[in-house]
Image (tube, rainbow, N blue to C red):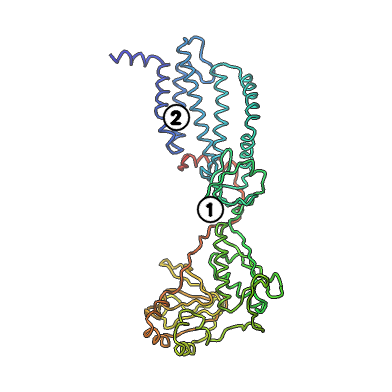
């Protein structure tokens, strides 16, 4: 019973073409989920096979069906022609998306790929309508132009956003993932650029949607382009009893102690103001990216306050807002005496006066030049150190021979206590980044205190507080692609069939 129908089907080229079209409709949803090279390869093959069966059925996609077709057959032929033009448009869009997304991610060129798809569908739609139905395209274009004018007047704001979005995508003043600032205190990271608006994630993790026409008219500050490194400026006031040279040295060491601050470009500290009771200092430094600005400011200010308190350098005060006792006359001494060092350390200040004085007498001052190692990893250790002044770097060697910086130490920091308490070797290398003044406490001098005061070991046990390392994003000058256009085109074609672009 089925054989006669199957035979009739095979003898009718038109029915074969319809069967090929139905097979394409059945697999199209599966094909759209496949990698790019699979979609392009299968799509071009199917397009060629479909064209072959259409020509066998005396149907050419570039002209209307022959007058010999019956009404039903003519309608079917026109439907097959439209489906062929749709497959042709899909292949053009897929290949075009590969060229647009070459060395880019999908979300970075989403607007451009959507615009490409719209233009291809529009052009193919006009062409297919004129060819398949043998209709005058000029009249259709004129009618659509009038409709476009009416819609443009009705949707003036939306059209303005649309063309502003096209201009922003052509000029590309910002990209997905860039940190930008707009007029009106709008700051955040760009997460999406759509036809109508740009989505910005603020520092409060809110999604702020700004129309493209508003962005096109405002001043845009891109903090991530052409380089991600960002400059930070702070103003600090110190009392005028502190010599400017000593104050600048203390501020520079606080900057160097902060691991969020880049060492290149070099941080700068300058005297900016001379007041009646205070001296103002201008501090400039750089961080690896704009998002870490607030964290770096907080760390620097904490270190400045801590180092100033340790060195006995008073911060500047407003005479109108604060009423404080008059400070003693005369300059602040350059360095505190060894006998008062332990009084400033909470760990030792709670010891009885006699024990504290005995330990103070055992302190051994030690000067370390910049670049000199206090001790190396793996060495035997029988003493711990207290930083009086300067900045030191703590590094630990990996199994592959490289070293990682795990912390930086400054005034009031202890290091070397692990070897004193456990008797093991040094677990890291400590090297001075600047000229440093240390106080060495030998194990034989502190051992009686450790035996008598058990809680003292708990305070000295940690080598130092490990500060979280900042991620150093590779940033550098952005240059244009200077390769030959032909070579670049061949590279893109090879990229199409040899990589998975995921579009």
Identity of the residue drawn at 46% across and 69% down:
466
Query: Which of the two residues, 481 or 122, is positioned nearer the viewer here?
Result: 122
Q: Earlier in the sequence, mark 2 or mark 1?
A: 2
Question: Which is in the foreground here, disc 2 or disc 1?
Answer: 1
Q: In this view of the protein, which residue sits in the foreground, 382 or 299?
A: 299
Image quarter for residue 169?
A: top right
Classify 10 Å Cα crowding around label 1: few (below 14), some (14-19), many (20 and above).
Answer: few
Pointer 1 residue: 204
In this rendering, position of residue 28 left or right of residue 343: left
Which of the labelled discs sits on residue 316, or is there none?
none
Q: Which residue is mark 2?
A: 45
- The residue furthest left is 1
Could you say where residue 315 lies in the image, as x and y percent from the top left?
Answer: 62, 74
Residue 481 is situated, as x and y percent measured from the top left of the image, at 60, 48
Report the Cα–Cα distance between label 2 and label 1: 51 Å
- Quarter of the image containing the N terminus? top left
């Amino acid at each position: 019973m089925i054989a006669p129908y199957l035979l009739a089907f095979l003898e009718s080229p038109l029915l074969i073409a319809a069967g090929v079209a139905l097979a394409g409709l059945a697999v199209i949803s599966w094909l759209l989920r496949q990698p790019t090279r699979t979609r392009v390869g299968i799509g071009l093959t199917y397009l060629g096979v479909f064209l072959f069966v259409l020509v066998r059925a005396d149907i050419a996609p570039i002209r209307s069906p022959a007058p010999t077709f019956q009404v039903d057959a003519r309608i079917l032929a026109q439907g097959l022609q439209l489906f062929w033009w749709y497959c042709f448009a899909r292949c053009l869009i897929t290949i075009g998306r590969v060229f647009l997304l070459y060395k880019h991610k999908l979300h970075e060129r989403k607007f451009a790929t959507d615009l490409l798809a719209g233009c291809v569908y529009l052009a193919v739609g006009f062409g297919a309508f004129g060819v398949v139905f043998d209709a005058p395209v000029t009249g259709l274009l004129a009618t659509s132009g009038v409709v476009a004018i009416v819609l443009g007047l009705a949707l003036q704001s939306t059209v303005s956003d649309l063309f502003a979005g096209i201009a922003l995508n052509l000029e590309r003043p910002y990209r997905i993932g860039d940190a930008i600032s707009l007029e009106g205190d709008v700051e955040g990271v760009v997460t999406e650029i759509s036809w109508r608006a740009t989505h910005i994630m603020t520092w409060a993790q809110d999604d702020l949607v700004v129309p493209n026409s508003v962005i096109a008219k405002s001043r845009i500050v891109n903090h991530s382009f052409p380089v991600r490194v960002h400059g930070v400026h702070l103003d600090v006031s110190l009392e005028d009893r502190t010599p400017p040279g000593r104050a600048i040295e203390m501020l520079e060491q606080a900057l160097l102690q902060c691991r969020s601050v880049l060492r290149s470009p070099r941080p700068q500290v300058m005297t900016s103001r001379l007041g009646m009771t205070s001296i103002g200092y201008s501090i400039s430094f750089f961080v690896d990216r704009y998002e870490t600005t607030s964290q770096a400011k907080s760390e620097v200010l904490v270190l400045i306050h801590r180092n100033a308190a340790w060195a006995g350098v008073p911060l500047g005060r407003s005479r109108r807002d604060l009423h404080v006792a008059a400070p003693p006359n005369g300059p602040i001494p350059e360095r505190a005496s060894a006998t008062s060092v332990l009084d400033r350390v909470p760990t030792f200040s709670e010891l009885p006066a006699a024990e504290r004085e005995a330990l103070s007498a055992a302190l051994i001052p030690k000067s370390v030049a910049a670049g000199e190692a206090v001790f190396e990893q793996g060495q035997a250790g029988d003493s711990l150190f207290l930083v009086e002044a300067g900045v030191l770097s703590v590094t630990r060697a990996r199994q592959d021979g490289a070293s990682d910086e795990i912390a930086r130490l400054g005034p009031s920091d202890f290091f070397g206590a692990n070897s004193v308490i456990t008797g093991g070797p040094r677990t890291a290398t400590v090297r001075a980044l600047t000229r440093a003044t240390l106080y060495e406490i030998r194990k034989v001098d502190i051992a009686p205190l450790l035996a008598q005061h058990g809680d003292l070991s708990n305070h000295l046990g940690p080598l130092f507080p490990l500060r979280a390392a900042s991620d150093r994003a590779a940033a550098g000058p952005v240059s244009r692609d200077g390769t030959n256009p032909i070579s670049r085109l061949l590279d893109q074609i090879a990229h199409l069939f040899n990589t998975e672009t995921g579009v």
